[in-house]
Image (spheres, grey):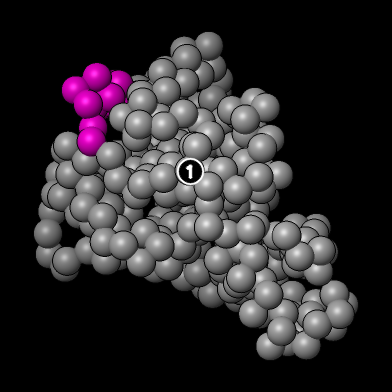
Amino acid sequence: MADALGIAVGAFGRVALLSATESVQDHAHSQVHALIKISGADTSFLVDGQTTPMTDRQMVLVNPWIVHSNDREIGIEPTILLALYIDPLWFGEQGNQIVAGFHKLPFHQVAAEVSPELHSQARYLADQMADFHTEEDHFDPLLRELVFSVLQCSKTDAISDVSSQRNFASDPRVRKAIKIFREEPSKEIDLSEVAKNVGLSRSQFYSRFRLCTGLSPRTYIDTLCCERAAGLLSNPEISIAEISEMLGFSAQGHFTRFFKSKTGVSPNNFRMGHIEVGRVLR
C-alpha cells in the first residue's frame, strides 16, 4: 500500500504524492498517467506486459486504459513518487480526439528520461503538496509546466503520431456496454445481463470487449469504480460506508481492500491526504 502525502483534485484530473511501500495489483485509468520518482528506493512497474524501472532518471508513462501494476520487493525503503492522472479533456481539442478513440494516444513508449528541469519541477510541486500550499492560481500553471515537460521528455506532443494498435470501442455493441457501465459504475453489474442486452453471448461479449479495448469487462468496471470512489471520497459529507454501498460492495471491508489493491492507498488515507485545489482539507 502507500501513504497519501497529498492528493490534489481539479479540472485537470488528480495528482497524488505517495509514499509507496507495498505492491499494487493490475489496474488501469481513463486518464493520461505518469509516475515520477521524488526520492527513496527505485522500483519498477509492469505496463502492458513490459517491465519498466522507475528511477531518479526515468519516469513511467501509461496511456489511458492500459493495465499496469507495481510488484515491490518486501522490506525495501519507501518510494516517494508523484503520480499524475491527467484528464484527456484538459488538453483541449487534442484531448477530445483521445476520448473519441481516433487511434492516437499521448505516449508511444512506457518510459522516458527525466530531465533536470522536469525533476526540479516535480520536486517543487511535491513540496507544495506536502506543505498543503496549493492555491488554485498557483497550482494550475505549475502542473501545466510539469505536464509539458513530461510530454517533451517523452519525445511526443499531447497526441502521438504513432497509432494505437487497438481500435478502441469500434464495435457498436461494445460502445453500448461502455455506456451502460458508465451510467452508474458498480460491482453489482451483471455482465451476463449486459452481454444479453447488447446482443452477444457472454463468451462473445468478453472476446469483443477485450479486442476493442484491450481490457476485460471486469477490469473496465473496476477502473470506473475506482474513479467514482476517488471522486466521492473528495466529499467529506459522504461516509466511506455510504460510498461502499453506492458502489455495490456487500461490506465496507471489501471496498477498502478493493480500493487499496487498485490504488495502493486505503480510502481513509486517500481522504486524509486530499487537497481540493483552492481549499485545503485536513
Tell me residue 94's x, y (percent).
62, 30
Task: Report which residue position mark 1 lands on.
Answer: 162
Rendered location of residue 278, percent (x, y) = 55, 20
Residue 201: % across, % down: 78, 88
Indicate the amino acid at tag 1: Val
Q: Nearer the viewer, residue 280 or 12?
A: 12
Q: Is residue 14 visible?
A: no
Answer whether residue 118 is magenta in the image: yes
Depth order, front residue of 241/68? 68
Indicate whether 181 appears above or below 208.
above
Would you call the spot at circle 1 few (<14 residues within 10 Å), some (14-19), or many (20 or more)?
some
Left/right placement of residue 117 relative to residue 90 reads left
Magenta residues (range): 113-126
Q: Main secondary structure of the magenta part?
A: helix
Res. 204 image quadrant: bottom right
Residue 26, given in percent of the width and then of the height, sits at 42, 67
Residue under the point 19% across and 23% down: 116
In the rendered view, would you say 240 is above or below 198? above
* Number of marks in picture: 1
In what quadrant of the picture does the N terminus appear? bottom left
Could you say which is closer to the camera, residue 146 or residue 213? 213
Q: Is residue 36 magenta?
A: no
In the depicted structure, whether residue 177 falls above or below residue 62: below
**Which SS class for mark 1?**
loop
Task: Specify whether 217 is left or right of 165.
Answer: right
Rendered residue at 36%/59% (across/down): 47
Residue 192 sits in quarter: bottom right
**Residue, x 60% and y 48% (percent of image)?**
103
Identity of the residue furthest to the top in this view: 137
Name which residue lies at 59% across and 37% down: 88
